[in-house]
Image (cartoon, grey):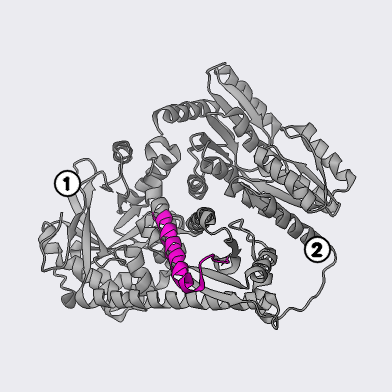
Amino acid sequence: MSTEPTILVVDDNRDNVEILRTFLESRGYRVASAEDGRSALAKVEEVQPRLVLLDVMMPGMDGWQVCRTIKNHPDHAGTKVVMVTAKGDFEDKFEGMRSGADDYVVKPVDLGELEEKVRRNLEAGERGS
Amino acid sequence: MKILARVQDGTLQEAVAEAAPQLSAELLTVSGGNGRSSEQQLVDGLRSHPAVVIVEAAATVSLRRLREETRARGVALVVVCASSDEVRDAVEVRVDEWMMLPVTANELVGRIQGALRRTRESEAPELTSRAAEHLRYEELLYDRFTGFPTLPVMLERGRTMLERTGRLTILYIEFVRYSKLEEIYGWQKLDEVLQTTANAVRTFYDRQRGDEESLLMVSHTGDDDFIFFTELQAPPETTERRINEIAEALESHVRQQLESTHGEDIGGLFGIYVGATTIFRNPKIRTERLIYRGIREAAQAARSVENRERTRKITDLKTVLREGLVEIAYHPIVVTGTEEVYGYEALARGTLRGLRSPEVMFGVADEANLIWELSRLCRRRAIEGVSMHLEPDQLLFLNIDPHDFRDPTFRYLDVDELGVEHPERIVLEITERTAITDYPKFQEYLRTFREQGFRFAVDDAGSGYAGLGSIANLSPDFIKLDISLISGIDTNFMKQNLVETMVSFANDHGIKVIAEGVEREEEYESVKSLGVHFTQGFLFHQPRFMTSAAEPPAN
């Protein structure tokens, strides 16, 4: 079994998913994906990713709720959650913090910045609880 | 009647298999497993016209879709959940019934009947008039929160008991919480505590059943109370003693569970009061009526126990106020980096047993309308300790309760009476929430207090009531970052980013930032590198205590 950490990309826009998947796989990560909140939660259970890249704006269950559900789950609370948000204003970040998110990136996503944030969160995950 | 079930859990399967014949129903099962084919099989199964569908929340990919399909066909939907998150989802989707694992066949039978009734009624609403004394109890078909069966389901059993031995003992367990609980801890904590209580009552019940086989339990949603029915094998002379034994054992068991799960402070914020009554078969009166009346009597008995307790607590509080039985703990606030003590936050605790926790003490004071008096006492004590515990250049941080704004003694703060020699050394802490909610008053007092030299801190900043702009408008001298922002900040970049923004903002406005709740070395390192000016938390010196002025300080 491969030891590269699994990253779960959650976004209702398939193009976004593909861009992120292609990029992250080229950097050596294993990538899984989901298109909405409910299937994201099912995927977390199934694939046990180390990190989830979570789009905030999704129809149905929104990203904040998915984040809270993951972070409140006894088995998955250690999974890192990075929110992908269209605005990076203070209130939004606060909402994210309160939902338990570990980090955020702002759309349109700068891939270099994304890679750095993925790396630092995975590393923090190894260091911390 | 047909029951369609898709369940994987072994004991649940057994329970369903046992329940079906009790309902004279044919059982159809769909194989478990994830994936589309299983979901599809379930939907196909709907075409065979079952009356009710039973699924496990965990194994169902789209509960919403299943709800739509079942509703369209007038089929009842019962969902078995393993966690409170699953319960919330089920409730959100408006299933007909939900249950928490583990589940017994009897419970299932009751729930399925309820779900069927609900489905029937939603199609053809009937207007039945019920006697007022029954309405309160009968509306509550099922306890949505604790998962215990409720009264109408258990009524049959109670009736059987009564008719078998001619008597029935009813225990009413009243569960009371201080109103401050939700205010201080939020509704989520309240839910958790209720769940712990329900579990504790359940384990007590399971244990007792060994001794008292006739013990039946119901629950009563509206007020989060519980009702036990028992035939009590004991002979009549010892009945009362036996009831008291059960009541005391139950109370201490629940309290112990609450304290060990949530801490002594929260445990103290609840009261459990047990009242009991025994009813006797009377051929002239309808059994149901007898039972409802008995429940009312038991409830009243519980209430009078509660009133006695409450009175005792208030009497104790008055003793605290009269004799000044309050001690102050001084929590150090240090300069980040040098760790030199910049000041101390004063936190008051009662010294009388039962009123030790500040939340309980203030909770009782709130209910007895003695908040002002208590606040004044605590302030006075805190200030008295200054000369003994603080260096001349160290500041004293004092918490202000929202009620203090209405206290005339506080509004027209008599600096001399309070014994404050140097107002410039006092920092008044107001929570972000109070500052924003009482904004106009707060602004006004700010001016008055400032003129005398007092300074202000916004406490619990970042707990979400206000944007930075609103906080800036208050022009506080200090902002204290809530522990939720600091906890685990070393591995959470979101929090780091937020704190960085707040520090930068504070620096632009001449405000100093204090990080609360620093408990680990790593958190302190992060806080240091983010430029937070002051730090508070258990990582530093243990707080120092001061008992009443006459006694030497305890360490």
Q: Quadrant of residue A22?
A: top right
Residue at the bottom extreme, as displayed: B284
Chain of the residue under the numbered disc 2 shown in the image? B
B149, B86: nearer the viewer = B149
Q: Work out whether disc 2 and disc 1 sit on a shared chain.
A: yes
A38, B325: nearer the viewer = B325
Does the stretch in magenta take in B51? no
Task: Look at 44% across and 58% down and name the residue there.
Answer: B254
Does the stretch in magenta take in B252? yes
Badge 1, how many Cα within 10 Å: few under 14, some, many 20+? few
* Residue for badge 1: B340
| Residue B81 pos. (x, y %) | 64, 47
Q: Is residue B278 above or below residue A10?
A: below
A71, B494: nearer the viewer = A71
Q: Are marks 2 and 1 in contact (CB under 8 Å)?
A: no
Q: Which span of residues is magenta-colored? A: B230-259
Task: Look at 79% across and 49% down and name the residue there.
Answer: B21
Callout 1: helix, strand or loop?
loop
Q: Would residue B176 be found to the left or right of residue B77 on screen?
A: left
- Screen quadrant of the C terminus of chain B: bottom left
Task: Identify which amino acid the numbered label 1 is placed on.
Answer: Glu
Task: Identify which amino acid the numbered label 2 is placed on.
Answer: Ser
Q: Would residue B412 be found to the left or right of residue B500 on screen?
A: left
Q: Quadrant of residue B248?
A: bottom left
Q: Is residue B417 above or below residue B518?
A: below
| Residue B244 pos. (x, y %) | 44, 69
Chain of the residue under the numbered disc 1 shown in the image? B
Q: Nearer the viewer, mark 2 or mark 1?
A: 2
User: Residue B370: in sight, yes or no?
Assistant: yes
* Residue for badge 2: B122
Task: Look at 71% across and 33% down and name the residue there.
Answer: B34
| Residue B95 pos. (x, y %) | 72, 53
